[in-house]
Image: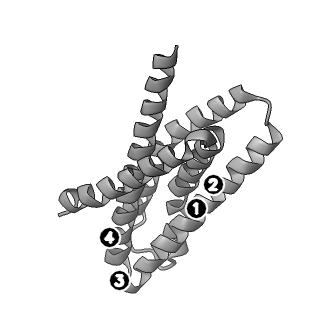
Amino acid sequence: MIQEKGKSKLLLLFGISFLSISMFIYQVILTRVISAIFTYHYTFIIISFSILGLGIGGIIAYRQLKNNKTNNQFLKDNLIKKIVLMPISYIFVLGLFYILPFSINILVYIIPAMVPFIIGGYILSSIYSEFSDISNKLYFADLIGSGLGSILVLFSLD
């Protein structure tokens, strides 16, 4: 039983790392796409809106968890849905950029581009609140994932 708990926490840490890797690479891809569609002056807005999306996702998770504190199954079901939605949202947003190239209004790109960050913020906030006893390890896994993402993106977007 104890060994099984250790394996599940290790999988959780790997999951956090891979989530961070994917969100970091997605953010760099968005920066490259927006700089190609618009002038490079608009690339700073991706960082601002990604942080905004993570915050909105955290607020949504906090409110839902506050309303359903006793229902642990609700948290698991919601997390599974969000984890499935994450890659779908990446595909949807990048497909939308392909379908609507060179739109005049930057909000046409920015608002949908926030959706994966909102989902990621929800997932991270839910996990941090549920496993607050190992928050230092979760944060370390998040930092490792972001660091690996910054290295992997150099090789993948050459």
Q: Is residue 70 toward the left or the right of residue 60 in the image?
A: right
Q: Which percent across, then down, holds residue 32? A: 32, 70
Of tags 2 and 3, the one toward the viewer is: 2
Q: Earlier in the sequence, mark 3 or mark 1?
A: 3
Seen at 36% across and 52% down, the residue is 144
Amino acid at circle 3: Tyr
Q: Earlier in the sequence, mark 2 or mark 3?
A: 3
Mark 4 lies on residue? 32
Q: CA distance from mark 1 to mark 4?
A: 19 Å
Q: Name above or below for residue 94 compared with residue 43.
A: above
Q: Earlier in the sequence, mark 1 or mark 4?
A: 4
Mark 3 lies on residue? 40
Image quarter (top left, top right, bottom left or bottom right) of the C terminus:
bottom left
Q: CA distance from mark 3 to mark 1?
A: 21 Å
Mark 2 lies on residue? 57
Q: CA distance from mark 2 to mark 3?
A: 27 Å
Q: Is residue 113 toward the left or the right of residue 118 in the image?
A: left
Which structural element holds mark 1? helix
Amino acid at circle 2: Gly
Q: Earlier in the sequence, mark 3 or mark 4?
A: 4
Of tags 1 and 4, the one toward the viewer is: 1
Q: CA distance from mark 1 to mark 2?
A: 6 Å
Mark 1 lies on residue? 53
Seen at 59% across and 36% down, the residue is 79
Amino acid at circle 1: Gly
Q: Which percent across, then down, holds residue 22? A: 38, 50
Q: Which percent across, then down, holds residue 96? A: 44, 58
Q: CA distance from mark 2 to mark 4?
A: 24 Å
Of tags 3 and 1, the one toward the viewer is: 1
